């Protein structure tokens, strides 16, 4: 776990936004990962994607690291934000916009508003 923990810490430190997911942002391998990656892509957020299916140590390591049992997991500025349901709720409530604003993460506000309009 220590090697995985070190790699996770380095990835989170090196990137403002990191999504630990099944698959990649271009080709998600599960619906929950696809939803979160889709939201981030649609909002124009630059993020690092880590495919947990490609590395069993990271797949288990990220669950231990966050003490959160499921994938995907979103990190902003090194802090664990949540999984699919939490990110969906935060997107629809505008909390994700606020978090990005407070942390200096670039995103397209107009596209974030469109997500809320389509789901409101």
Image: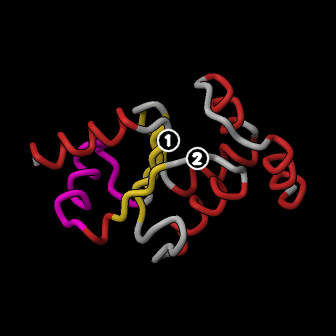
Which quadrant would residue 7 be assigned to in this image?
top left
Structural crowding at the residue carrying mark 1, measured as other residues with C-alpha within 10 Å and reported as few (<14), some (14–19) or many (≥20): many
C-beta proximity under 8 Å, tags 1 and 2: yes
Q: Can you tell which mark lies on residue 17?
A: 1
The residue range painted magenta reads 55-71
Q: Nearer the viewer, mark 1 or mark 2?
A: 2
Q: Secondary structure at mark 1?
A: strand
User: Where is 89 relative to 51, above or below?
Assistant: above
User: Where is 63 relative to 95, above or below?
Assistant: below
Residue 50 point in image, percent of width and height: 37, 58
Q: Going 29% across and 44% down the picture, which residue do you hit?
A: 67
28 horizontally vs 57: left or right: right
Q: Going 69% across and 50% down the picture, which residue do you hit?
A: 44
Total labels: the figure holds: 2
| Residue receiving disc 2 | 46
Which quadrant would residue 95 be assigned to in this image?
top right
**What's the distance in space between the residues labelled 1 and 2, CA to CA?**
7 Å
Residue 115 point in image, percent of width and height: 81, 55
Structural crowding at the residue carrying mark 2, measured as other residues with C-alpha within 10 Å and reported as few (<14), some (14–19) or many (≥20): some
- The reply to whether the magenta stretch includes residue 107 is no
Which quadrant would residue 23 be assigned to in this image?
bottom left
Q: Can you tell which mark lies on residue 102?
A: none
Q: Going 65% across and 57% down the picture, which residue do you hit?
A: 41
13 horizontally vs 3: left or right: right
Main SS, magenta residues: helix
């Amino acid at each position: 776990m220590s090697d995985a923990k070190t790699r996770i810490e380095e990835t989170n430190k090196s990137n403002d936004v990191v999504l630990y997911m099944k698959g990649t942002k271009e080709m998600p391998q599960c619906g929950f990962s696809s939803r979160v990656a889709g939201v981030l892509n649609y909002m124009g957020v630059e993020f690092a994607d880590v495919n947990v299916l490609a590395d069993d140590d990271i797949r288990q390591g990220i669950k231990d690291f966050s003490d959160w049992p499921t994938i995907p997991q979103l990190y902003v500025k090194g802090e664990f934000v949540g999984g699919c349901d939490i990110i969906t709720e935060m997107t629809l409530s505008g909390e994700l916009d606020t978090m990005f604003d407070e942390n200096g993460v670039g995103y397209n506000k107009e596209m974030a508003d469109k997500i809320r309009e389509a789901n409101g």
